Amino acid sequence: MAESAGSVMLARSAMNRAAAEGQRPAGRPVRGARRISAALAGLAASTRHELLTFDDPVASAGCAIPGPFLELAGACMRAAAERADEVRRIVPRHALPRLESGLGVPGRARLADAIPFKMIVVDRTVAAVPLDLELLYNGLLLIRDPVVVQALVRAHHACWAAAEELTYVPPPPPPPRDLAPQLRPVLDALLSGLTDETAAARLGMSARTYSRRVGELMAALGTTSRFRAGAEAARRGWV
């Protein structure tokens, strides 16, 4: 446990040092549900080899977080886990009942007495840490500084070695369904957090045509909520 605590201190020290001494900040803060959703979707889409997380599935209980945002965040993490060759998730012991109810992600998981902060690390190249270290909904720091990312990976490895293995068998993924080609750029624009006006201009469409395509996408996904659309797209493997 001493090694684990030391690694966590190293990670926090690296973040502070990179921010104070580096010519560029250690990470880019992302705020607002729309931008945070886009960042999470981007992380899921970029995952190829490894996904490391500190996660507390019950941290949001009692907090005023919209259900669609939680659905989207969960769907993005499941999509990332399904893409990765190696998934290592560390959760606090009090979250075990939530995991046993089936609200988990694919891959390996271990139980720790506590986690130091919530965290996502993708392919050892980019990390996301909540600005308040607790809830992604309150804002996150998107980190690409290699020193800081490596320190976070080391902290995760030390905690993993001291944690208890948890066996979890996820339900089978839903069968894939195709996305109409003309709706792909609309989905990408929606997940990027662009306003309708900006998205229409970038896609070379009139605002009316873009609005119609968004409606077609929502109908294909069976929802009228843009947050739920992102979650459903991730669930279907379209992200």
Image (cartoon, helix red, strand yellow):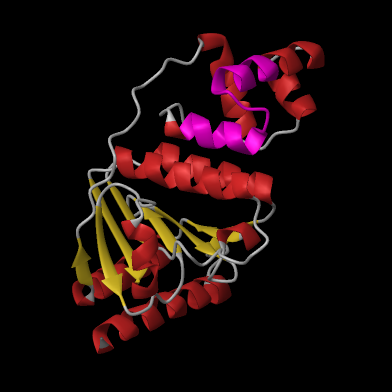
Viewer can see residue 197: yes
| Position of residue 210 measured from the top left corner of the image (x, y, whole percent) | 72, 16
| Position of residue 203 measured from the top left corner of the image (x, y, whole percent) | 67, 17
At a point 23% along the width and 54% down the height, the residue shown is 168
* Image position of 137 with respect to 177: above or below: below
Tell me: 34 left or right of 119. Answer: right
Quadrant in which residue 8 is drawn: bottom left
At a point 31% along the width and 38% down the height, the residue shown is 83
Q: Main secondary structure of the magenta part?
A: helix
Q: Is residue 187 magenta?
A: no
* Image position of 144 with respect to 226: above or below: below
Residue placed most toward the observer, 168 or 141? 168
Q: How many marks?
A: 0
Quadrant in which residue 137 is drawn: bottom right
Residue placed most toward the observer, 72 or 43? 72
The N terminus is located in which quarter? Answer: bottom left
Tell me: 33 left or right of 86. Answer: right
At a point 80% along the width and 17% down the height, the residue shown is 207
* Image position of 154 with respect to 43: above or below: below
At a point 68% along the width and 28% down the height, the residue shown is 224
| Position of residue 76 measured from the top left corner of the image (x, y, whole percent) | 46, 42
* Image position of 197 with respect to 61: above or below: above
Quadrant in which residue 191 is drawn: top right
Q: Is residue 222 magenta?
A: yes
